[in-house]
Amino acid sequence: MAPKDEETPVDITVDTATTKKNDKDAKKSKQSNDDIVEDDNALSEEDKELKERLETCVSTLINENNEASVTVPIRLQALDVMVTELRSATSSMTSVPKPLKFLRPKFDLLKKYYGSIEGDNSDKELLFLRARLADVLSVLAMTLGKHEDRESLNFKLKGTKDFGALKQLGDTRASDDNLGSWGHEFVRSLAGEIGQEYNSRVIDGADPEKDEPFADLLGMVDVIVPFNVSHNAEAEAVDLLIEVQRLAKILDLDSIDENNYKRVCLYLIKTADYMSDPDDYAEVLDSAYQLFVKQEQYFDALRVALRIGNDDSIPDLLAK
């Protein structure tokens, strides 16, 4: 009797690495979706009410049902509610604020509506609506916008332009263009995008020695830097000025006084150690020197003068 052929065993082993990877990707995808749309059953009654209120405001703003009775003033009222909720939630951010989370799914819808707003720039109500909506989109883009497109900055620049047009028309609501009212995290995010946009324009051929190609960015820098200095974020203010090559502006700040000049000067002196360009090195130290002299701290100014080789100023400092 012929022997039976030996059967080849079937490999039933499971690639555990692949399985774990797939499970991890699935969980990551689920968490990503949960970040945007939270299960209503997991929300408290207060959160449900907030979510419904914001969704109603969005529906009214974009006039989802195409009702003739929805006028610009009514849209503004709905937008005001959204602005108030966002500002109160983003003033001190320790986690993703609920209003920001609930408005995330409406981001593309709001962008589409913003793009459809057209009209004469002499129409104050329409200008104010567009400016405020641009601010809301700028805040939402902080977490949802495309990093390479710098959407948050672009929307804020558009809003600032409309607020400027309102100011020229003598509308007092132009004062609503307040960067600080959106919270420190928003200001910090915006400063980062300003640095990126500045470098992009320089690469594209803009002359960094001239202010005209960067007028819109520098206008925002002039708001952000004093805000940072007055909110104990002197290092961020210095970093932004260095990023846009306008460190000399720090000497004109009224917000630098006897209470914070030491932090500013110490950061400048430490930063100088990382400057590879001799001119940048000298400018950073000279800024610290000028601030010390302005605050009548002549001994500290003398130490900086010796470091940068400013021998001509030594007799005057010793005399003081």
Image (spheres, rainbow, N blue to C red):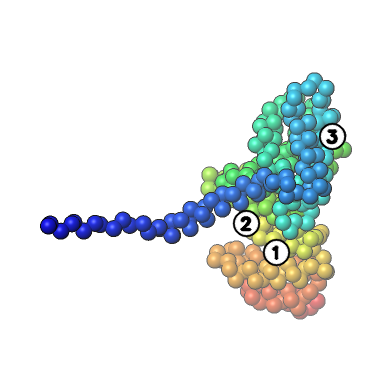
Type of residue at label 2? Answer: Glu
Quarter holding the C terminus? bottom right
Disc 1: which residue: 235
Do tag 2 and tag 3 residues touch (Cβ < 8 Å)?
no
The answer to whether residue 211 shows anywhere in this view is no
The answer to whether residue 92 shows anywhere in this view is yes
Q: Is residue 311 above or below residue 255?
A: below
Disc 3: which residue: 77
Q: Is residue 213 above or below residue 240?
A: above
The secondary structure type at the circle numbered 3 is helix
Disc 1 versus disc 3: distance between alpha carbons? 39 Å
Rendered location of residue 313, percent (x, y):
71, 73
Do tag 1 and tag 2 residues touch (Cβ < 8 Å)?
no
Disc 2: which residue: 243
Do tag 1 and tag 3 residues touch (Cβ < 8 Å)?
no
Quarter holding the N terminus? bottom left
Q: Quadrant of residue 235?
A: bottom right
The secondary structure type at the circle numbered 2 is helix
Q: Nearer the viewer, residue 235 or 152?
A: 152
Q: Tell me which label, 2 or 3, sits earlier in the chain.
A: 3
